[in-house]
Image (cartoon, rainbow, N blue to C red):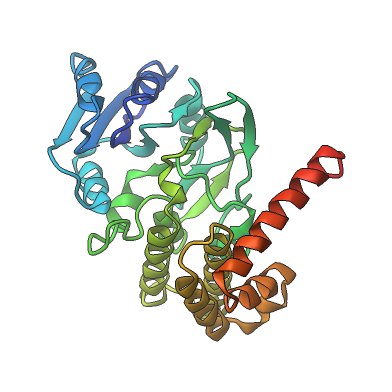
Amino acid sequence: MNEPLVSITIFSYNQASYIRAAIDSVINQTYQNLEIIITDNGSTDGTKEIIEEYLSDPRIIFLDYPANINASMLQNKANTLSSGKYIGILYGDDYYLLDKIQKQVDIFETLDDSYGLVHGPGFREDVETGNKNISPCAEVRGHCFIELFEKFSDGFCNPIAPLARRQCYIEYQADEDVFFGGGGEGLFLLFALKYKFYYFDEPLVVMREHAKNAGKRVKSNTNAHNHLMTRILGHKELPKDAIPHIQKHSSYFKMNAAWHILRTNDDLNHARDLYLQALKLYPKNLLHFKQFVGFILSFCPSIFIRFFNRAAFLFSKKRHFYGIE
């Protein structure tokens, strides 16, 4: 059987401590018919020098950007340059298990063209302890656009686990008007407007948890998510019966972001604004106890919120000590 070419894009930015493991996890795959596009977004910590050690591998294309620019532009450029039948993405601080691509290609080659994505769960690795746990994700299959919104709180799609048809990334490009303009895993929602998903219940990737994770940028991630929802609501392929599901989801997402901001005692005005925006979209989400408490807290003085956060931390620690959790 002819093995189709698979394009893997590795996105790196100041990840010198991890980038070698990320690259090795791709070049050492059991599946070897690969095109490896490494895009570095203006690293200044020695990441570029490590990448250059691998450039003798003819499968590697190095997109070396001298300064940090819009991440969505990087993704679109890499996808346009790619030649593979399928595309996978990897961040420079994460890594693949060595049979990841082989297993997903084997599945894809049995599916018809109506399928755009093979996805599944992954591991989360604590860089301080080395402990790994399975990170939950939405177990969605087939035509699943509305189901993705209903199951978003289950973990959505793991950002690096999927392998997608190249055509998906060409048809639904990341929005370059904002820094994370619906790129990354946000594009999977757009794919689901047209294509079916195949769920493979085996973790094949590892995402590292550390202090510099981009996912911890709550405000910028929330803004990017809001931008994506606006884009989806205006999409010509959007089914009308999906609109209430999107509104409910957007409300829930805003409330969760507001709760995270409150728990870090950050920008209380921003947290309050997010709650008010969420209420306009789907008021019933306030019936959840946590969301109701967060909404009330957003109107309290910051000294009270600091006291609440401290008490919540001590209570959680005590529960863990006595084995209640």
Position of residue 210 measured from the top left corner of the image (x, y, whole percent): 48, 36
In the picture, the quarter occupied by the N terminus is top left
Q: Of 161 and 102, which appears nearest the observer?
A: 161
In the picture, the quarter occupied by the C terminus is top right
Report the residue at 60% width, 53% height from top. 140
Q: Does residue 39 appear to the left or right of 133 in the view shown?
A: left
Mark yes or no: residue 201 visible: no
Q: Of 162 and 261, which appears nearest the observer?
A: 261
Residue 291: quarter of image: bottom right
Report the residue at 32% width, 56% height from top. 180
Q: Residue furthest front?
A: 303
Mark yes or no: residue 149 visible: yes
Number of numbered markers = 0
Q: Residue furthest left?
A: 66
Asked if 288 appears above or below 281 in the picture, the reply is above
Asked if 244 appears above or below 107 in the picture, the reply is below
Q: Of 79 and 222, which appears nearest the observer?
A: 222
Q: Of 154 and 6, which appears nearest the observer?
A: 154
Residue 244: quarter of image: bottom right
Report the residue at 46% width, 45% height from top. 159
Q: Does residue 101 appear to the left or right of 298 in the view shown?
A: left
Asked if 11 appears above or below 261 in the picture, the reply is above
Position of residue 235 measured from the top left corner of the image (x, y, whole percent): 36, 73
Asked if 186 appears above or below 86 in the picture, the reply is below
Position of residue 4 measured from the top left corner of the image (x, y, whole percent): 35, 29
